Image (cartoon, coloured by chain):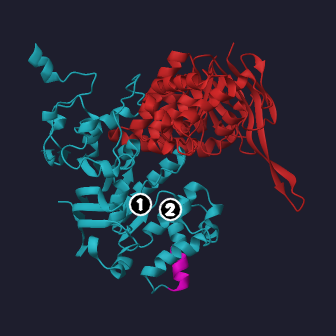
Chain colours: A red, B cyan
Amino acid sequence: MPILKVEDLKVHFPIKGGIFGRTVDHVKAVDGVSLEIEKGTTYGLVGESGSGKTTTGRAIIGLNKITSGKVSFEGKDVTNLRRSRASFHRDVQMIFQDPYSSLNPKKRVLDIVAEPLRNFEKMSRSEEKKRVEELLELVGLSPESIVKYPHQFSGGQRQRIGIARAIALKPKLIIADEPVSALDVSVQAQVLNFMQEIQKELDLTFLFISHDLGVIRHMCNQIGIMYRGRFVEEGLTEDIFNNPQHIYTKRLVAAIPNIDPGKREDSLQFRQEVDNEYKESYDNYFDEEGLAYKLQPVTDTHFVALPEKG
Amino acid sequence: MAERLIDINNLKTSFRIGDDYYAAVDGVSLSLNKNEVLAIVGESGCGKSALAFSIMGLHNRAKIEGEILYRDHNLVDVSESTWSKLRGKNLGMIFQDPLTALNPLMTVGAQISEALFLHNRKLSSEERKAKVIELIEKVGIPRPEHVYTQYPHELSGGMRQRVVIAIAIANDPEVLIADEPTTALDATIQSQILDLIRELKETMSAGIVLITHDLGVVAEMADRVAVMYAGQIVEIVDVNRLFESPLHPYTRSLLNSIPNAEKGQEKLHVIQGIVPALQNLPREGCRFKERIPWIDESAHEENPELHEVTPGHFVRCTCYKQFHFPNEVKEDQVHANS
């Protein structure tokens, strides 16, 4: 049984207009997304800005209201749960993109990391302090850090404080929204390594949201590619990178800068070919509104959004 | 011999923190040739943008010492009136974030014509408009007449960055400084903008200084690369050798820390420690020493200098000779032991 199952998720935001502020239209930020994540794996959600990948993540954890569709966690329906102390909120945690704005600058590290503990567990002050120190050690920060404030840390260290907070309640699923986009490459490496370590240690499942295909390829077992609120392709990492089927996926893959300067001409040529193909065959891949079709299976693991045959 | 455009000698750009000045760019010597893309790579805080801003004379509170020689000017101490003749005419700049670089209250057309008007008063308004539309077309924006009358907020991020580029190249500058020109953009748009800059380079015969943190962008764009760490250049080399045979420990560490599917490595390399804050930078000895503590102290030079190891390949300090990653043993040590 998959740990997380999302069925036909839709998140529409109303556009208000006119003098009475009536709803005149909707922005279909997420428009029919389905995915399943197996325990202990990492699922990558990729897309460019505005594709709805962040909204998908936020809707799953309950930060955005779900318009329709169903989210099940460990077989239980958790769609639009009220803010109750349901176990779901313990088991699913989030790591945010920007380590500079996701930590309260007025709080000490102790209070930041202990906040989920205070919400869900009854602990004495000394137990709490001990647990926070353990957590900080786990993310590679010294126990003395508990009395410091966020500004006293570097970007990578802050992101690790965010991770310590996310794993405080021993969650089962972590939604990581662009966790390394704001970091330098060497710090990025540190955070990615660390995420893989705690995944093994705690048998964690990740929903990893990113626009960076290099990072996604490094981290994920399975990938879903989003475009304008819908999936255009879904498959195992090998499926997506070795055998991309949808023209949009091909474009994304072609746009990754080639690290070998000797192959510059080749990659430029490849990009131009894909670009021409994109222009020529756009109508085969997108409907009249420029949206992706429904996913069709290519193999058991690989799905591509194509018009239905026949 | 390639034609020199800019010669930077021992440039030192310092910022005031408290009562003292601290050098963010600390003794950089560099040259830019015609028709080349010189990439300056480094992580945040290494001084790459401070260097770019120094070349363009955009710092107003910093203390700048050393020389930036361009034609018969030393850009470090030319007057503001000379600057306003040079900036935008001979030297153009592409900024990182197109939304903040453009004026939200002016149409695209007006912003580009302003750049033309400031340096060329002879054009009639019709001629200028024609030139602007030509520029909009040149940077690959569809329907230039329509876009001429639009405001920045009506355009997508990629289109805005094209407008910024149009302004930068309006007067055919000899030197173009691009400060992280694609960092704010999506991947597919990034590749389009990079292709555009490359195309423009062919037609303009300008020298381009490309500031970036992204080694992928370097591999795609650069001819020559300067790697910066803590205000200093630690390695200068042509792009092929940078990726084939990087020497400086910092360069090698950086290259090892990017996820690379072909290598298929499980663990990414992590550089130990953190970049020290400007006030706490070690000003003596090898600045990278703290980050590679497993390398013997004696490997470093007392006053690390750039050494020309092979023609055109400069490396700072001597520690590269003994450098190895913690999990690998240096070859000659194996021989010594056996």
Q: In this view, does A71 lie to the left or right of A17?
A: left
> Sequence-wise, which precedes: disc 2 or disc 1?
2
Total numbered badges shown on the rendered structure: 2
| Residue position marked by numbered label 2 in the rendering | B139
**Quadrant including the N terminus of chain A:** top right
Residue B208 in view (yes/no): no
Residue B234 in view (yes/no): yes
Q: In this view, does B174 lie to the left or right of A50?
A: left
Question: Quick one: SS at disc 1?
Answer: helix
Residue type at mark 1? Answer: Leu
Circle 1 packing at 10 Å, graded few (<14), some (14-19), many (20+), is some
| Residue position marked by numbered label 1 in the rendering | B200
Q: Which region of the structure is painted magenta?
A: B124-131
x and y percentages locating residue A160 in the rendered image: 49, 33
Question: Quick one: SS at disc 2?
Answer: loop
Relative vertical location of residue B140 with respect to residue A50 in this rendering, above or below: below
- How far apart are labels 2 and 1 at the CA level? 8 Å
Q: Do the residues labelled 2 and 1 touch (CB within 8 Å)?
A: yes
Residue type at mark 2? Answer: Val
Q: Is residue A20 left or right of residue A197?
A: right
Which residue is pictured at 86% across the width and 51% down the height?
A: A23
Secondary structure mostly seen in the magenta stretch: helix
x and y percentages locating residue B207 in the rendered image: 32, 61
Within the magenta stretch, is there residue B76? no
